[in-house]
Amino acid sequence: MLVQATRAVSNWGLRAAFYVSLFIFVVVAHIACTTALRAFGVGAGPALLISGAVVLAVVLGANGAVALFRKLRALRIARDAAAIGLPDGPFCLAWAPDPAWETPMPWRLAKPIRVPYPPLARRMGVEGIAVIAFEIGSDGRARHLHCVDAWPHDAFYAAAAAALRDAHFIPKRGVRPRMGEPYRLPFLFRIAGSADIAHAGARARPHRPMVSAAAQALERFRRAA
């Protein structure tokens, strides 16, 4: 059974887009400013010097504004996190469910569960797990949900439980489910990469196999050295 959570946009991609945009702005602004000064009769050398100073002042001002925005945003996130008890800083968790935790289910999902990532935890880079115990009614809906485990915050259980309540289960072919049977379902929330979690409890498959293979090769080389 696959449980999927949304994944944050890469910070490296955002930084690359920012610096490319900044470079284009500097080139265009410098040419425009130099052309305007030459039109007013300013010499080539002074025009280049003045336009360079103007563009530099604009870039430094924009950089200061961005730094101030980031500082204010970090303070707001920290304040919001402290208000609900989320831990400070990123948490990374590589975890796969133990088959012994799960009762074999005579049900199957009508469609995959889509779990929205808790917004504040996503912005902070916090990853976590939630294990939910539940029953399935005659209508195929989950009921009597109970939190078995949630780490590092109950926000992950709240998100998983909301998605599980909307899920629809269908009896497997040739099986007659018994009403009131308890089940447990683990949810794995990850931001840095994604994973496919097999129902049998196999290990998580890295989202980027080439990067994972390179890291494993480097680790083997270090051990050999």
Image: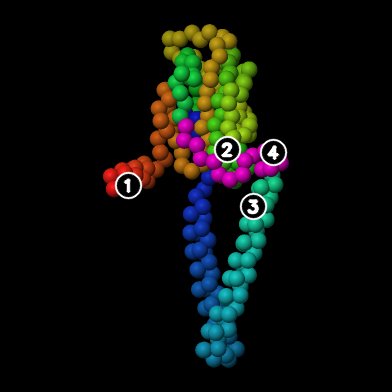
Q: In the image, residue 200 lies at what x, y percent? A: 42, 22
- For the residues labelled 1 and 3, the Cα–Cα distance comes to 37 Å
Q: Can residue 163 be seen in this view?
A: no
Q: Which of marks 1 and 3 is nearer the N terminus?
A: 3
Viewer-side label of 4, 1: 1
User: Within 10 angstroms of label 2, few (less than 14), some, or many (20 or more) residues?
Assistant: many
Q: In the image, residue 61 lies at what x, y percent? A: 63, 70
Tell me which corner region of the image, top left, top right, bottom left or bottom right, holds residue 67. Answer: bottom right
Give 93 or 205, whichever is nearer the viewer.
93
Find residue 222 and name its label: 1
The kind of secondary structure element at disc 4 is: helix
| Magenta stretch holds residue 74 | no
The amino acid beneath tag 2 is Tyr
Q: Give the residue number, with chain letter if any, for mark 3.
A: 74
Q: Give the residue number, with chain letter if any, for mark 2.
A: 117
Relative to residue 68, is residue 175 depicted above or below?
A: above
Q: Which of marks 4 and 2 is nearer the N terminus?
A: 4
